[in-house]
Amino acid sequence: MQSNIQRIEVTPRVGGGLRDVRGDTIKSQLKTDHNLEITEVRSILGYQINQELSKDQLTKVVDELFTDPVIEIGCFNSSILDNKNAFTDTPEAVITVGFKPGVTDNRASAALDGFTTIFPDLGKDVKISTSISYVFFGLGDVDLNWLSDQLHNSLIEIALIADSNDCAIGDWPEIQFPELKDIEYAAPSTIDLNVSDEELIEISEKGLLALNLEEMKAIQQNYLDKDVQARRKELGLPPDKPTDVELECLAQSWSEHCKHKIFAARINHVDTETGENSVIDSLFKTYIMQPALDMQQEVNWLLSLFHDNSGVIEWTPEWSLCMKAETHNSPSALDPFGGAMTGIVGVNRDILGTGLGARPIANTDVFCFGPPDYDDHLPEGLFHPSRVMRGVHAGVRAGGNESGIPTVNGAIVFDERYIGKPLVYCGTVGILPRHLPDGRESHIKTPEPGNLIYMVGGRVGSDGIHGATFSSLELTDESPSSAVQIGDPITQKKMVDMLLEARDLGYIEVITDNGAGGLSSSIGEMAELTGGANLDLSKVPLKQLGLSPWEILVSESQERMTVGVDEKNKQAFEELAKLHEVEATIVGEFTNSGTFLVNYGNDVVADLPIEYLHDGCPQLNLESEWTPPIHKSIIFKEKTSPEEMGNILQRLIARPNIASKEWWVRSYDHEVIGQSVIKPFGGVNHDAPGDAAVIAPIPGETKGTVISCGIVPRYSDIDAYAMAAASVDEAVRNAVCVGVDLSRIAGLDNFCWPDPVQSKKTPDGRFKLAQLVRANRALEDVCRAYSLPCISGKDSMKNDATLDGEKISVPPTLLFSLMGNHEDVRKAISSDFKNTGDAIYLVGETKQELGASELAYMLQEETEGVSGIGGNVPSIDPERNLSVYKALTKAMHAGLVESAHDCSDGGLSVTIAESCFGIDAGAKIDISSLDSFDDKLDSWGALFGESLGRIVVSINPKNIQAFEEIMVAVAHQNIGEVGNNDDLVIMKNDTKILTASITKLREAWKGTLDGGSAK
Amino acid sequence: MSVKVAILTGFGINCDRETAAVFEMAGATSERIHVNRLVNGEVNLQDYHIMAVPGGFSFGDHLGSGRLMGNRLRFGLREQVRQFVNDKKPIIGICNGFQVLVKMGLLPGDDDISFEQTASLTLNDSGHYEDRWVTLEFDDNSHCIWTKGLKRMRVPVRHGEGKFVTNDKKLLDKWDKSGQLVVRYVDPNQQYPSKSDELLPYPLSPNSSWRNIAGVCDPTGLVFGLMPHPEANHSTWLGATWTRENLDHGEGEGMAMFHNAVNYAKSQFSIND
């Protein structure tokens, strides 16, 4: 036993109505995920305190802090496994998991806080660490090393195993206290860039700088400039070479992650189909920014675009809204829990860092994973998709729930190509008052030279160094563990509470978050507003002594904001921080000197001209070439009976992409803040899926906002133009279903692409870039047609994993998120059918469009590739769709629509089944008239095709005439009525073509992704 | 003068805004007050008529839900809270706030207000956190001032640790007799009254709480706590199935509880506004 370390163990009491639910959950998940039968799993929470404590003191902390006397048994400096009151039998195995040194341990931070409450005078140098032990009974023949691997992540945790022999003699695992040793301080060094091109590349690669040759040369050139050299001499910096601090700062600022170099590149685009050969000067400026700026000319509600952490729109005269979505893919591949949690709390900070500070009021989470039942070869170094899913979900759950921000909308998409890198999109909506009490408009930052720069929140450690540059590289076996972090929602929640109070008191002049690139990015970016900043890295509070200046500058340690405060508010700001128990430290000041001047104490360690830092990165030149891919056609079985058709629907609805996500979604709090109008699930049994969230953020007021999303990566296999168009249309359609005000909608584009830069590693880079070009063109075309500006967006362009020599690239994926106004939430519409006998209408046109449909992929899998996915991918006619949406919206506002549900994955038959779930009854449908828009439409296309622009609505018979009058100019077809029994019957030309039981469909739909509750 | 409500905030409490809002909607004046402002004496609890400990994840619930916040209050506000109850002023704890009041021993409590913990809220039998709507039924014999006249109410639960248990089962009978087991989960398809000690199946009872207990009060009926969130159903358009119902829009079912407390305070402290 280590000296001075006090060990405390706590286990739940069991029996008499009490259970060890933590153990039961592990047992149930091992059964669900691995079909492992274990008689019993018990759990023990361990704590170590590195402080001499008397017996009395120990008894006090065990009784009053660590153990709940009603439900737990605790002990100190002995093993609870030897306590016969807790464990009557000898276990077969015990696995104890603890953290590696330096990994965020939130339970330990809470314990330390609790310890300080009890012993306020002892707390100063006390450190606490935690562990958890799993105790197995009736384990059978299981490889304990394998089991231990399922229970911990060796990147951040260590696990110790006691096998049955150890257990028999009571030799229990004992984790060592994870002491974080101070590291040896390395003074700033300089890097000689007057070297060969090969050596420049080597410097970039070895240093994880992710800079290409041209960029390295641009840096090299800067230090040859005579004026630069003269100024450097004056400051005492090496005149002709960068310091490591400068090189790291440039690498962060110029990283793909921060600079979006591919979206800013000059692209030579060739289309072999049309003969086009053209040059595109920045995808971002051409297809995203320009359309939004044009739309800004037309309306008065687009308050802030493209220059802040998120875009801001006016919502009411008193309030504005902002929204941002981010991805956290690479960290989530390495540590799903920590990576995802960091993703959600990170995007929350983007909102807090918008304007003078916005309050996060809603989260959205969209994930792309490998199939949960994947049983093919898994390259070494990858987690099974089901484990990635559990981890990501748990991380987002903890991050969102503990922060008190409801998760209101999202999606989960499955595809084998996401096993290398999962996509973890986290979005947040924020609200901010139009004006602060002091009269300032809160979406405008107001920094002045002389403002003090505070770092607020968490401390800086070696966790999260090189996150931005790492995400700009593909995932390999050597990916650094320091890129992984675990969020600390409570530290952040305290900071959010404090900063919003400070905002309303008028203390904040400028605020931004410390995300990618750490202080180098946050201060570097804000310095642009005043024209300079001074930073003293020796003032920055550290988790770990000895960090080098460059590490402090680029560390991405979480839960930190950078805030500019006027000198006159210094004392009040610091007192407020103290009250909230939030650390706030002055680390520098804003200037108008024209440079970002960084000190470490008295030593100058970096001096970077602001203009060079932000605009010095050379533009990439890239090649793009489009040739449409060729796919095998879908093979349909001839003469399919109505029952077989019903079975096909049942298999389709059970596919992970369509199946109910209720088990997962319900463990997010979607109702905190008391604003949830349209929830993720509705209907008589609260299990029918909603289309979009509607929230009414101001208590008692009926004006609302709509939040929806669209994502259809499958279509990229045929054409990324169709993919992007369908994503935008789906987001809009979902919003229309709940009654959005189409005159005030705003979008977010989040691209996740495989590396589209042609190279030896990426021989198909030109094609992937052409896919990106096409997706961007669709984005512009559709957004302009819908008057839907993209107010924020983000791209992640290296979603490839090379492991075991295998490269796995994600399919080109665009997540389109939408935020829109809702004039009166009392008129919001839900997706569930309401009354037996209501007429069912399909609005919009149906075409024979089964290419890359969910059905096509199902048939491909079922025939082991004999059937293909080729065919017409859903095409878009946004003007036509918009007129349908507008007419339907009018009918909704007139109170004529009982339900509305979006037609997407799986087509019409799936949509109808889902609306049926909401009333717990079937429907009688007749699709005979559907082919009026496409004479090639067959039953497959009518039932399962995914044509865009379509919504299934139900209408009370008494309103049919009024409804028809409003819809007269747009496509709408009466296709049946809501039934009164369990049968779904679909007819065509007086013949039954599909019959199914709603109960059975529902069971299949709910069964696939039932996450496994403790039983 | 109006009824003044102290809404505690800080350290991960996160339902403070809507809890403040519902008291305002019920005609009171709410103030969100950081716990430390009460502990350091900057604000005096005795200046308020009602105290609410809202839901949230105080200190991340890492050492058991509500435990650390319970200790903060037990160590820092002990006498102020005791005085508050002795002054016949109502206290409510919702979700995490309920957990805090139970862990600090104020609920179900005793006549001496001794802050001895006699019950707990432990992990749901389902093993996971969950947001879903439930139906509650109230004990109409209870003297709890918060639930007077209430029969049933539909509200969401949003918790992972809501199973009410005790280490002495005899206490349950005692509390039942004294009207302290104020609110239970029930099956909405059963006729009122249907509350029962027999365990309801999941998810009618979302956590397998003993005797389907969703909330309890102290011997005085002034201090009340419950796991579900009445403040989340403050308006009709926030209900789980409101789009299926023919409603006159306005206040939601959850508001009755807050009206009760505000009306009680008005009459107890002769406040006319």
Image (cartoon, rainbow, N blue to C red):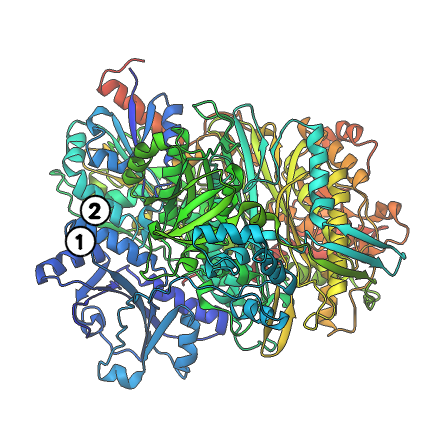
Q: Which residue is mark 1?
A: A64
Same chain? Circles 1 and 2: no
State whether residue A754 is above or below residue A507. below
Q: Which corner quadrant of the image does residue A628 belong to?
A: bottom right
Classify mark 1: residues with Cα within 10 Å, few (<14), some (14-19) or many (20+). Answer: some
Q: Are marks 1 and 2 in contact (CB under 8 Å)?
A: yes
Checking the image for residue B71, the label placed there is 2
Q: Amino acid at mark 2?
A: Asn
Total residue callouts: 2
Q: Is residue A818 left or right of residue A432?
A: right
Residue appearing at x 56%, y 31% in the figure = A704
State whether residue A976 is above or below residue A230. above
Q: Which corner quadrant of the image does residue B194 belong to?
A: top left
Q: Is residue A110 left or right of residue B75?
A: right
Q: Secondary structure at mark 2?
A: helix
Classify mark 2: residues with Cα within 10 Å, few (<14), some (14-19) or many (20+). Answer: many
Residue A850 appears at what percent x and percent y?
A: 79, 58
Distance, label 1 to label 2, CA atoms, is 8 Å
